Image: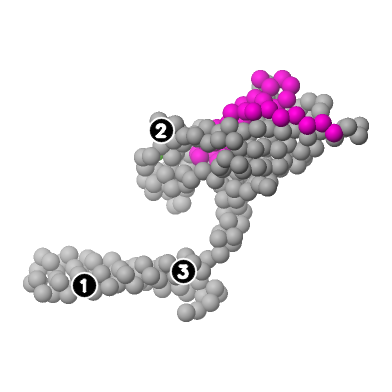
Amino acid sequence: QSSFGCAADEAERMRERRVFLWSVIIATVVVVVVVGDDEVAKLIERTDQLTHDFECFQRKINKRIDPERLKRAGSLEARVETLEGHPCGSGRYQCGGDDPQCISDLLVCDGHADCRNEEDEKHCELHLKPGDKFVGERVFDHCRRLEPEHITLTINSVSTATFFTGYPKLQITVNIHVDKDDVETEAGAPTIAYYSFAKNQLVIVGGLGSNTDSLALIGQFDGHNFDRFVGEAILESDTVCSRFIYHRQ
Ligand SMILES: [Ca+2]
């Protein structure tokens, strides 16, 4: 078997095999109509063998692609998509691939395929679980006078309502670490958050110190690397008053 550098050749070969496989399947159908049982049996056997070979080949290819490399490529693609803007508008999800279909965010991960390419039900595994901890480093913070250095989020529990599978609910403890005038202070508060598969967002409402009602924290994952997210605190006026970069501990 060839090395990594021959991936393009392998992809080409895989395409050729797929075309060949389909030809055999179509031929089988034709033979069923016009030829006798013996030939049909032989062809079915041959098709089974080819299907088996094809699946083995595909497994070998998948094994050889480094998951870290796939993750980095995905993160880069997400950045480009962010720069290009969201073509479907707010509250809408783009099915992706070569099909630019738009559906409502509410239909993502609801258990039914709504995209023609079924993309809305393909990324529904929650990468956050009880015990996970994320530490956020401050980029800027004008929300309050505290100006914390770090914010730590600890996930205590995760639950999914059967009628609302696209938005798992999380209980999170938010700890704020302040180091001001040589005095270190730490304050913790339990909060409720929801994860949106459609947006790859963690939305925490309240519980971020004083004036909790007027703050929401939006944690934006890129949909590929679930060890990092950008957390922004949003005021009622829709203004972003702080940004922290969070990393999984
Ligand atoms: Ca759906």
Instruction: Please tell me in which quadrant of the rendered image residue 186 appears.
Output: top right
Which amino acid is tagged 2?
Thr
139 with respect to 62 (left or right): right
Vertical arrangement, residue 174 with respect to residue 133, above or below: above
- Gap in Å between the C-alphas at discs 1 and 3? 25 Å
Alpha-carbon neighbours of circle 3 within 10 Å: few (<14), some, or many (≥20)? some
Position in image of residue 10 (x %, y %) = 45, 73
Query: Is most of the magenta stretch helix, strand or loop?
Result: strand
State whether label 2 is within 8 Å of ligand 1.
no
SS assignment at label 2: loop
The answer to whether residue 104 is visible is no
Q: Nearer the viewer, residue 232 or 228?
A: 228
In this figure, which residue is indicated by the disc labeled 2? 162
Q: Based on the picture, tell me whether residue 206 belongs to the magenta stretch.
A: yes
In this figure, which residue is indicated by the disc labeled 3? 61
Q: Nearer the viewer, residue 135 or 203?
A: 135
Which amino acid is tagged 3?
Ile
In this figure, which residue is indicated by the disc labeled 1? 45
Q: Based on the picture, tell me whether residue 117 belongs to the magenta stretch.
A: no
For the residues labelled 3 and 2, say whether their Cβ atoms are less than 8 Å apart. no
Say which residue appears at 73% left-offset and 36% top-offset: 151
- Gap in Å between the C-alphas at discs 3 and 2? 36 Å
Which amino acid is tagged 1?
Glu
The stretch of residues the image draws in magenta is: 184-213
Position in image of residue 45 (x %, y %) = 21, 72
Position in image of residue 174 (x %, y %) = 68, 32
